[in-house]
Amino acid sequence: MPKKIFSGVQPTGNLHLGNYLGAIKNFVDLNNDDQNECIFCVVDLHAITVKQDKDELRSNIRETAATFIASGIDPSKSIIFNQSKVHAHAEGSWMLSCMAPMGWLNRMTQFKEKAGKDKEKASVGLYIYPILMASDILLYDTTHVPVGEDQKQHLELTRDIAQKFNKDFDCDDFLKSPEPLIKKNFSRIMSLKNGLKKMSKSDLSDLSRINLTDTKDEIINKIKKAKTDSFQIPNEGQNLKDRPEAENLLGIYSSISDQTLDKTLKEFGGKNFSDLKSQLAEVLSSKISPISDEIKKLTNDYEYLDKILAEGATKAEEIAGKKIAEMKKIIGF
Ligand code: AMP
Ligand code: TRP
């Protein structure tokens, strides 16, 4: 069955190895299958749920698009665009927010994490962020959404919203419930400094993550400084319990090398972390450095990136515009 793929990444800078292994690498594989129709969106409306600097935002939108292309997404085989160019996303989000109960949103753990202790000061946008995400997905009759593990709850909400809309307006299967595509293994890449914390763009320590724009030397240095423990690498996966840093480094090695954890443990079991680290730095720099070089090349070519984004927006508008028109009719406008 051909799949209709939609996914989004926020243009908030510092795209990292977690984004790549958890999401973007998957986008590339799906895009390589000619049967699939793929849409990859730079979700700039989501980015402004927290304060952004205007010039940085503009440059991050281009850099995110460049990262998609540099990672191997072929713009001639997919639609790449930025969300704010297609009106239907915000419009759809409003309509869906009028039928999504607050109780559902109150359960979203990402809001709780991002809003922190002072919820009263978080923007309303941050609170209804998952509804805009549902709108993104539902406007394109998406069947599959490749995302990292942290987005699973938002996908479940999207399905609930679709079903409630169809029921409230008695319109059968008008909004299609999408399936999440979350990698079974290594779906959460953790910080290099704390194996219990997700690798994240917003971590204050740059040593906690491998950025997709890092040079070879930076990658080698960050892996060298990554936290480990004082035991040897085990031969069996079950012996990684309570050793989050070891598990993370072995997971990253397996994921980037496209091999199972068992195979990695066979390679490194009984060895010291210095062996794993030197191999890992080698593999990572051979895979990430070419992406990094290409991002730098592409971000210097504004015209090319703006053309891709403009063409993508025109194609996206065609699909989403039709859906939103039908949605309005169903509602009674
Ligand atoms: P964001 O940068 O928050 O827009 O995330 C873009 C994509 O990367 C989403 O699909 C996330 O689930 C995924 N992602 C972000 N951080 C990680 C991580 N540490 N491990 C795995 N996937 C991640
Ligand atoms: N919320 C996602 C994230 O933070 C980004 C996103 C926005 C998205 N809209 C989407 C992902 C639609 C998949 C589909 O990572």
Image: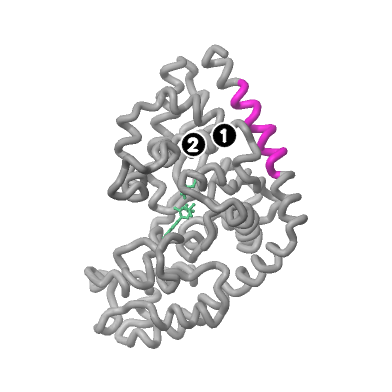
Q: Residue at x 27, y 80 (%)?
A: 229
- Label whose residue precedes the other's in the sequence (1 or 2): 1
| Quadrant assignment, res 277 | bottom left
Left or right relative to 77: residue 156: left
User: Visible in this render: residue 31?
Assistant: no
| SS at mark 1 in the image | helix
Q: Position of residue 84 (x, y in %)?
A: 61, 40
Q: Circle 1 is placed at which residue position?
A: 89
As displayed, is residue 163 above or below residue 51?
A: above
Q: Position of residue 196 (x, y in %)?
A: 29, 64
User: Visible in this render: residue 7?
Assistant: yes
Q: How many marks?
A: 2
Left or right relative to 198: residue 27: right
Q: Position of residue 327 (x, y in %)?
A: 56, 21
Question: What span is colored magenta in the figure?
Answer: 312-325
Mark 2 surroundings within 10 Å by alpha-carbon count, few (fewer than 14), some (14 through 19), many (20 or more): many
Going by the numbered disc 2, the residue's amino acid type is Leu
Q: Residue at x 46, y 58 (%)?
A: 22
Q: Position of residue 151 (x, y in %)?
A: 41, 47
Disc 1 + disc 2, Cβ < 8 Å: yes
| Quadrant assignment, res 237 | bottom left
**Disc 1 and disc 2: Cα gap in Å?**
7 Å
Q: Is 127 contained in the magenta span? A: no
Going by the numbered disc 1, the residue's amino acid type is His
| SS at mark 2 in the image | helix
Q: Circle 2 is placed at which residue position?
A: 132
Nearest the viewer among 127 and 86 is: 127
Nearest the viewer among 258 and 118 is: 118
Identify the image's colour scheme: rainbow, by chain, secondary structure or one colour: one colour
Q: Residue at x 57, y 77 (%)?
A: 215
Q: Is mark 2 within 8 Å of ligand 2?
A: yes
Nearest the viewer among 27 and 213 is: 213
